[in-house]
Amino acid sequence: MTATDAQAVATAASGGAVLRLGTRASELARTQSQTVADAITAATGVPVELVLISTEGDRSSAAITQLGGTGVFVAAIRRALLDGEVDLAVHSYKDLPTAPEPGLILAAVPAREDPRDALVARDGLTLGELPAGSRVGTGAPRRVAQLRALGLGLEIVPIRGNVDTRLGRVPGAAEGPGDLDAVVLARAGLSRIGRLAKVTETLDPLQVLPAPAQGALAVECRTSDARTRELLGRLEDATTRACVVAERATLAALEAGCSAPVAAYAEVAEGEAGPELFLRASVTAIDGSDGVRGSVTGPMADAAALGRALADELLDRGAPELMAVGG
């Protein structure tokens, strides 16, 4: 039996056609999409093929804030999904706009990777060991703001590009110019493409709080596609969903996008009355001169309300003025 014949048998046995999964073409996007594709097939028997889609964020080397911020990596994929060119899409959840997209639904949020940020530095250094004046690369305003707020005297350098391009900016980390002392990236992305050995320090959220939904994936399909919705629902992780709903509710209530200096991180732990969600969030001026942090605890079922309540607290404490401070 040929591979094509085997796929046809599997498709017939599963009771449906091959699912077409739209994804960006970067190594990270393809890797995380293939992970979801394999999970779908393992759970349902339905084969999944990847369809590579070029997005505005992939085609431009400009800073995300110059491209319009939130959504530059997802708009083209969502168009293909709405047009029926693909059946589902896998996004890095933190890249999604907070407003829902008419006609589409987040059918599954799989279990989350470690959401913390990671430092990759020359000579195996940690953040605290970098000398004053060290050049540290990151493209995220949130990281820029929080790194500056630590008062370590670091020079923050804006960078773009895929993971290996960024690693190449650090001597010895990958092929590249090696013109920086360190870079800060999401630990989840490094894990997914097998680059964890490059990490010299995983940053404590007490120092650098992660982005809302960092480390989580969002699996999206058309609202009207009942079959695909049912298949994707088997990948759902309720704890991850509650955490990211709380984090992104904070982001939405602050009326901020992924290019704003907003951080939020939720965890679930066993409380007296069952599982409880503990949510922390912060807003930091881009120049690092000031910031506000807060936290809230409550039932998992109240995730969205908890996120909004924490955002209200941060707004009362001056978050809008901090988001307006330039660097």
Image: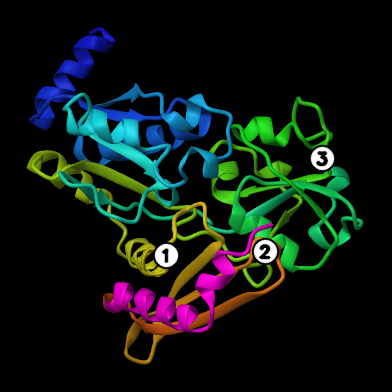
Dot in front, 3 or 1? 1
Do the CB atoms of the residues marked 2 and 1 lie less than 8 Å apart? Answer: no
Question: What segment is highlighted magenta in the picture?
Answer: 302-327
Q: Which residue is mark 1?
A: 251
- In terms of secondary structure, where does tag 3 sit? loop
The residue lying at 35 percent from left, 67 percent from top is: 249
Q: CA distance from mark 2 to mark 3?
A: 19 Å
The residue singled out by tag 2 in the image is: 146
Residue picked out by circle 3? 180
Amino acid at circle 3? Leu
Magenta segment, prevailing SS (helix, strand or loop): helix
Q: Residues within 10 Å of mark 1 (few under 14, many from 20)?
A: many
| Residue 80, image x, y percentages | 25, 28
Q: Is residue 64 left or right of residue 112?
A: right
Quarter of the rendering containing residue 2: top left
Placement of 192 over or under 256, stated as above or below = above
Amino acid type, mark 2: Gln
Residue 33 in view: yes
Q: Is residue 35 above or below residue 301?
A: above
Report the amino acid beneath label 1: Leu
Within-10-Å neighbours for mark 3: few <14, some 14–19, many 20+:
many
Residue at 82%, 32% in the rendered image: 178
User: Neighbour class for label 2 at 10 Å: few (<14), some, many (≥20)?
Assistant: many
Element on which disc 1 rests: helix
Q: Residue furthest top?
A: 2
Labels 2 and 3: the sequence-earlier one = 2
Using the image, determine if residue 51 lies above or below residue 270: above
Q: Which of the image's four quarters has the N terminus?
A: top left
